[in-house]
Image: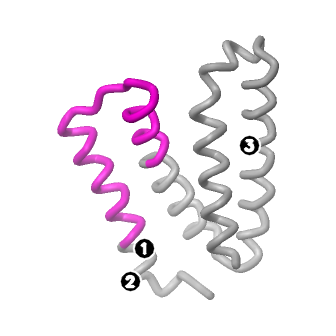
Amino acid sequence: MPWLMLFIAIVAEVIATSTLKSTEGFTRLWPSVVVVVAYETAFILLSLCLKKIPVGIVYAVWSGVGVALVTLVAWFFLDQPLDAPALAGLVLIVGGVVVINAFSKTVTE
């Protein structure tokens, strides 16, 4: 269950971060509401994950998967171009998360 909460927290954070620009400095109501609710959801779920998963592992997965997903959302939906070094960096980030989860003895549950 904590891994599912972490996944939902990451998705909520990606939604919030991807919507942030459309708030126009929090001057637009509905995008601002989406950002605040999504970040609140993300941090509540993130804190609950920490009851069962070590903080270093949670943060590594949170930041690595979050960065990769935000970059992909920006590429596909916000017309942000990605070049070969950016794509290579994303592969390395995801690879690092996989290595931590597959081989680290600090991952619990």
Quarter of the figure with residue 36: top right
**49 relative to 90, above or below:** below
Q: Secondary structure at mark 3?
A: helix
Q: In the image, is 91 to the left or to the right of 73?
A: left
Residue type beneath disc 2: Phe
Q: In the image, is 100 to the left or to the right of 18?
A: left
Q: Which mark is residue 100?
A: 1
Q: Secondary structure at mark 2?
A: helix
Q: Residue at x 45, y 77 (%)?
A: 101
Q: Residue at x 78, y 51 (%)?
A: 41
Q: In the image, is 101 to the left or to the right of 18?
A: left
Instruction: Indicate the position of residue 46 as horizontal and vertical percent values.
Output: 72, 60
Residue in the foreground of this view, choosing between 59 and 20 = 20
The answer to which of marks 3 and 2 sits earlier in the sequence is: 3
Q: Which mark is residue 103?
A: 2
Within-10-Å neighbours for mark 3: few <14, some 14–19, many 20+: many
Quarter of the figure with residue 3: bottom right
Instruction: Please say whether residue 81 is one of the residues in the magenta stretch.
Output: yes
Task: Find disc 3 in the rendering and name its residue.
Answer: 39
Q: Residue at x 64, y 46 (%)?
A: 13
Residue type beneath disc 3: Tyr
Contact (Cβ within 8 Å) of mark 1 with mark 2: yes
The quadrant of the rendering that contains the N terminus is bottom right
Query: Magenta stretch?
Result: 69-98
Instruction: Indicate the position of residue 12 as horizontal and vertical percent values.
Output: 67, 49
